[in-house]
Image (tube, grey):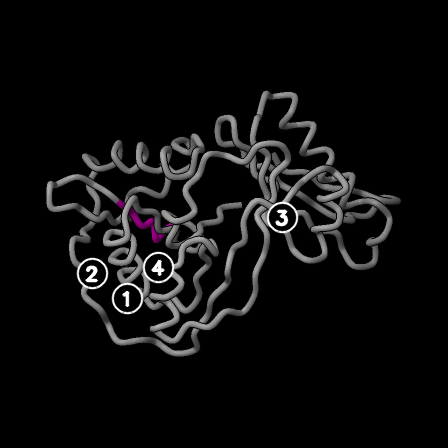
Amino acid sequence: HPLVAELDGQLAGCANGLRNGNAGWLGNIIVLPEFRGRGIGHALTAELVEFFRARGVVHQILIATKLGEPVYRKLGFETVAQYVFMKRETDGAPEPAAGVRQATALDYPAILALDRVLTGEQRAPFLGRFLADARVHVSPSGAVDGFYLPALANGPVLAENEAAGLALLASRLGDGAHTAVVPEANAAALDFLQRRGFVETARAPRMALGPDAAWRPTSVYGRGAGY
């Protein structure tokens, strides 16, 4: 659900809402510098909030910049978690990613079911277009217990256990990734990245209006965007 704001006939800002069942993400809320301080960011955010409310969306979520956080707080959003942004300047040595293989169409239902449990969102219609390049981690019992989507912006990695998450994260780094964003609560992922030369560059709050989705931050080994 994309929006634009106009002022005196000029494009002044934009915003986008991404609906995943009963969860809605607010993103790309941008106001051009020359138009800031006039309530445009507030108006765009409020419009998305009402759009989601009218459609019965229970969980309204966003990741805030320092510039946007005061605007969201005024509308009732509260911090529910922190994301840590990591970066390294050089490539690391290739690492084995035990248990990781290319996904097949037979794995797609397991990927989508796992995503539903770990994120608390109904993302199947959105994720469907990114599954062709997916990689999965397979447990000793043969079950898919984690996945990595290289084709989706930032290459999200989600897994229900540490072994799967770190193996998939190693696979992502093997693709040459120099950046990563993981929840502060996922100490295993942060330690893994730090030991491979990544350093923290920023933090940003995850904010929710009303109840947050029933997600598992310790199962997120790499955040994906998608706006």
Question: Which of 198 and 14 lies nearest the eye of the viewer?
Answer: 198
Cβ–Cβ below 8 Å for labels 4 and 1?
Answer: no
34 shown above or below 104: below
Q: Amino acid at mark 4?
A: Ala
Which element type, helix, strand or loop, lies under badge 4?
Answer: helix
**Residue under circle 1?**
174
Is-magenta flag for residue 11?
Answer: no
* Image quarter of residue 132: top left
* Label 3: how many Cα within 10 Å (few below 14, some 14–19, many 20+): some
Q: Which mark is residue 97?
A: 2
Choose the circle earlier in sequence order: 4 or 3.
Answer: 3
**Residue under circle 3?**
28
Q: Is residue 87 left or right of residue 212?
A: left
Residue at position x 25%, y 49% in the image = 135
**Residue under circle 4?**
188
Choose the circle earlier in sequence order: 1 or 2.
Answer: 2
